Amino acid sequence: MIHYQNENITVFQSALYKTTTTLIETTDAVILVDPNWLPNEVDEIKSYVGRVLNNRKLYLIFTHSDFDHIIAAGAFPNATVIASKAFANNPNKEHDVQQIKKFDAQYYLTRNYSIYYPTVDMVIEEDGQKLELASLTFIFYLAPGHTNDGLFTIVEQQGILLAGDYLSDVEFPFIYSSYADYVATMEKAEGIFHKHGIHTLVPGHGTVTTKPSEIAERIMASKMYLQSLVNLDSKLEGHLQKKYRFFDGMKDAHHRNLDMVKMEE
């Protein structure tokens, strides 16, 4: 299940939707981002955390409130939770919990921890908020568009961007909250890429890349896709079919994106 590992980070990847969980260690803390999906995968992540924690403080960062990203919050009840203000004030918390329970019921899954919506201890209210942990500085940026409560996290000294459900190599942009916000967030991502010298990108779904040229290409690909939605490019769907291996399973998301653009015109 370990998808990528170096001296700075460990990235787990689920069998479902290639969803990622990231673990970062400092001398006094362990930071875990979006632990997920299947019960055995969560058990593996929890076991790994147990082996490396060594009396350090555990932090949980949630990139957004989609149920697949909060599904394992209850496996780490003593962690300090970090998320955006919109995440903390989410009016649909019970709906997200019910989605988890519905998923587990559909596939006859049982979990050895409680299911609940995370309570946020450190609320990110504005771009540039920081968390200093020993030798590492974590810098947060609000990232609405996919959902209204998205969060980018930069590990400053290591040039890492934890992007949540943006900048994937297996998914085109999924717009659930606002097209205009998504466009602005991609502009923000481009600025972050240059300002912070990002050379490692961890998407919420897909493959970690350590190539700045590929990070730049993913940003550009997202921006071009968003522009093509407005232009009603007749060739767009054919292009997506060729570019994304799993497009047939994501086609409805593309059609929802088109509807979202029409609503905001």
Image: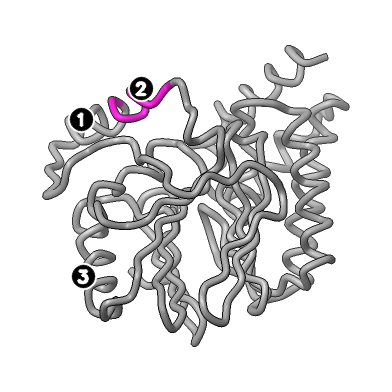
| Marks 3 and 2 close (CB-CB < 8 Å) | no
Tell how many labels: 3
- Whole-Å distance between the Cαs marked 1 and 3? 26 Å
Q: Nearer the viewer, residue 251 or 93?
A: 93
Discs 1/2, front: 2
Tag of residue 95: 2
State the SS at label 2. helix
Residue 62's spot in the image, x, y percent?
46, 49
- Let me know if residue 97 is in the magenta part: yes
Magenta span of residues:
92-98
- Whole-Å distance between the Cαs marked 1 and 2? 16 Å
The image quadrant of residue 137 is: bottom right
Residue at which label 3 appears: 47
Residue at which label 1 appears: 106
Tag of residue 212: none
Q: Is residue 121 left or right of residue 257?
A: left
Q: Nearer the viewer, residue 18 or 76?
A: 76
- Whole-Å distance between the Cαs marked 3 and 2? 29 Å
The image quadrant of residue 193 is: bottom right
| Marks 1 and 3 close (CB-CB < 8 Å) | no
State the SS at label 1. helix
- Let me know if residue 115 is in the magenta part: no
